[in-house]
Image (cartoon, coloured by chain):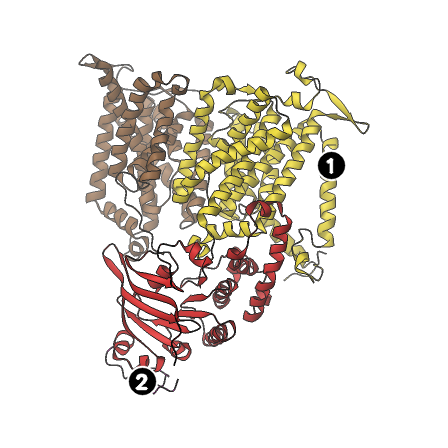
Amino acid sequence: MPIRPLVTRYEDDLALFPTRWNKIGLVVGVALLLLAPFVANRYWLDVLNLTAVYVVGAVALVILTGFTGQISLGHAGFMAVGAYSAAVLGNHLGLPFWLVLPVGGLAAAGVGLIAGPFALRLRGLYLAIITIGLVFVVNHVLRSFPSLTGGVQGTSVPMLWWFEPGGATDFLGGYRAATRLGGMRLESDVKIYFLFAALAVFTAWCGVNLRRSNSGRAMMAVRDHDLAAAVLGVSPARYKIIAFGISSFFAGVAGAMYAFKSAFITIDPPFNMAMSVEFIAIIVIGGSTTVLGAVLGAFFYSVARPLAESAANRVDLLDALSSSQQSLLVLALLVIGFMLVEPTGLRGIWVKVRLYFSGWPFRY
Amino acid sequence: MSNLIQFVASGLALGTIYAMIALGFVVIYRASQVFNFAQGDLVTVGAFVMVVLGGILPWPVAVLGTMLATGLLAAVVERLVLRPLVGRSVVITIILTIFVGLILRVMVMVVFGPEQRGMPTPWERSAAVSVAGARIFVSSIAAVLAGALALGAFTWLIRRSRIGVAMRATSSDQEAALCLGIPVGRIFGFTWFLAGAFAALAGVFLGMFPRTVDTNLGFVALKAFPVVIVGGLDSAAGVVIAGLILGVVEVLTQGYVNPHLGQFGQNFHEVLPYLIMIAFLTVRPYGIAGRAEVERV
Amino acid sequence: MTHPAPLLHVDGVTLAFAGLVALDDVSLEVPEGSLFAVIGPNGAGKSSLFNCISGAYRPRSGDIRLRGKSLVGVPPHQVAARGVARTFQNLAVFDELTVLSNLMLGRHHLMRAGWLSDLLWLRGTRRQEVAHREKVEQVIDFLRLEKYRRQPAAVLPYGVKKLVEVGRALCMEPDLLLLDEPAAGLNQEETEALAHYLLEIKETFGITQVLIEHQLGLVLDLADRIAVLDFGRKVAEDEPAAIARHPAVVEAYIGVGSSSEIDGVPTGGAT
């Protein structure tokens, strides 16, 4: 049973995986992550890759909305900036993927820092509305430079060129090159998987770090009571801006990941209000104030969505709907259900379950 | 010149529609501090209900019936979903109404199917009158007249009727209103009813301009956000004025400014209201007629 | 009695909201190391005074100086860095954070690691967390909050929340501590414990305190000097014994026609 060892040093108290059971869980988790792509078929591998994009995007939103209390409907705008930066830099400058990812993030962070100052003056509702405006403005600007972005036609992302040696020559033909790595054949999907899994873990780790350190505490203080935070020496303006910067950086990375995965992107869809709303749904379902919630929400959403779609296909009434509409319907019902019944989300349920078993077999 | 008259006329019609949608936001917001992101989807619902009712009832009756039905639906939504969360944070109600809107849109699709429908009109669809050489659509004139009529009825309701007094009392102090025996919950429901009715009216006329009705109709409400901000979230008069101004500005921009901006000008008029909104939010966040909130610690 | 230079000097402060005068030409001198109390009926402007000192409000005229340096126009978070801590009349603990995190926030203005270091959990951040944790543990010891350390503040009893707020202010190691009705809502036992802590803060930590309080008994027991506010004006300022007999206090605070004997408090200067 998860018993905490006696803590004798403050350093030990800061460990992320303090107990033996935590450590076992960590090892099992890593093993699952490493084995997954060899067990999953192509369809589920695709779902997993998408999950990683959702994890990065959801953690980004949790930092802004969950930690700092700044609601944003502009998430899709930041992701669009990241995605198009990746595409443009790859296509026109030929930058490698490992450089494109952070640069895409930085481009989005730049936009976030422009939007951030508005958040200093506006709260709640006004911020929500102005961030909707952000999505429209970003999309309009992207459409205005068709020579770079392909305009409404969209643009290809040199994903295969990055991930497959011969990919560039046979671009859309479905040709998948395989490389050899330690005797194993790794397809491009699997390579993307490892890259994405690492990014998702890294982002989640950053989110957890923030939460357990001074900056994250300051953000949560600003969220809960900004004057009380200020009299403690926390500058609300500073931490809102920092939250906007970090959040839009990771949103940009998530956008770049989305572009890699899609290989061909357009502006709207997918980078519209519906996408912003999707991410809000993910964090609400997961439990909106923690990193664990964001991760749970992302997994739940990406796994539940295909399941919900196949279920909806069996209901004649829902035939009229496209698959994305079906998933949005499921999502909307879930969000409303969670808000009315379990406002702390999946994480809240998890905490309750853990609490129950921590006293097992005794019930209080 | 005739171009200008034509642009202004259709701008005013568009502005009236914006104003009606925005009025719905304001009515709900003043009573319960909830910003209803589902407003646009109520517009869609209204348009589809009108498509059906317009086929079986005389036009004026169908319009009233549509307003009634959509209003009732909105009141039911309020009772089922919003009421249990009264007093929760703004962020919660924002998220909630967004998803209520999603469900409404999907419901419309399930009930009416994804096909486009024609909006019934009692006059010839492209009927127009000539004014100084400009062709002005009868639909535009009807939209402005109906908007004025609805606004008049609304003003009477707020100023003179019992429920109007109760609404004003609720908006100035919910607890005090409750103590005086005003059924605050039912007032919330009634404000949703009004918002639904306004949305339906907007939907009826909006459906006449693209001349078709589909489930994307509600996206126009996204353009009513700038109207609400520019007018002032708590000012009915403000949003009506802002609606008319932004409607005219949008059409004039489309006609006179877009062509000069090259590639950037494509659909520039669609983004312009947001740019105006952003400017207002920086300079005068409470809008042209709203009250600045004095924050006391 | 000697008069050391005042730590806090409130000089003719006037504050108005839309025509309503909240503070009218209020002047105070709070000597270093003293416990200064401000009393007065509801709406007398006591909390407004705190809000002016901590930078939430900007007075219309007058000056507020800490060690001779003006605090007027300094934003709240910088006032904190200059050594002013405060608690709020309506609790302002961060409900969703644990007691430990609440207290660690008191160390915020002393922490130097940047956001990037925090994000990546670099050595600076790790060291800082440990170093400041030690100071926080001293405060936890002092206020006997050990058993609440890991609980979110939301679930704590009211009295403990009030202590956490005081503790958070102590963690700031301030020169000046502003306490806004710390005893409001506490029972007799908790009030006595609080009184003990406040004296200890003065004696052991040597922190200057300004106390707003409604319980006259507590104030008369603890304070070195008391100012009385009414309708935004200072109507009296004196030693506790004299204040208890002051006609303006009896009128403004206890009501006209009361005897000079205040409930349970001997007014003969015995305190």
Residue B279 spot, x, y in % from top left: 34, 34
Magenta-drawn segment: C256-271
Q: In which quarter of the image is the N terminus of chain B?
A: top left
Q: Residue placed farthest to the right in the image?
A: A183
Question: Which is nearer the eye, C241 or B122?
Answer: C241
Q: In this view, does C239 lie above or below B191?
A: below
Q: Which is the main secondary structure of the residues drawn in magenta?
A: loop
Q: Which amino acid, by three-letter code, is at mark 1?
A: Leu
Q: Which amino acid, by three-letter code, is at mark 2?
A: Glu
Q: Which chain carries label 1?
A: A
Residue A271 spot, x, y in % from top left: 50, 28
Q: Indicate the quadrant where residue A31 lies.
A: top right
Q: Which chain carries label 2?
A: C
- Magenta stretch containing residue B130, yes or no? no
Residue B69 spot, x, y in % from top left: 34, 34
Residue C238 spot, x, y in % from top left: 32, 77
Q: Which mark is residue C261?
A: 2
Do marks 2 and 1 both belong to one polypeptide chain?
A: no
Instruction: Give the distance between the C-alpha atoms of the residues marked 2 and 1, in whole angstroms.
Output: 80 Å
Question: Which type of secondary structure does the marked residue at label 2 adopt?
Answer: loop
Q: Colour of chain A?
A: yellow
Return the residue at label 1.
Answer: A34
What chain is the red one? C
Q: Do the residues labelled 2 and 1 touch (CB within 8 Å)?
A: no
Q: Residue at x 51, y 36 (%)?
A: A109
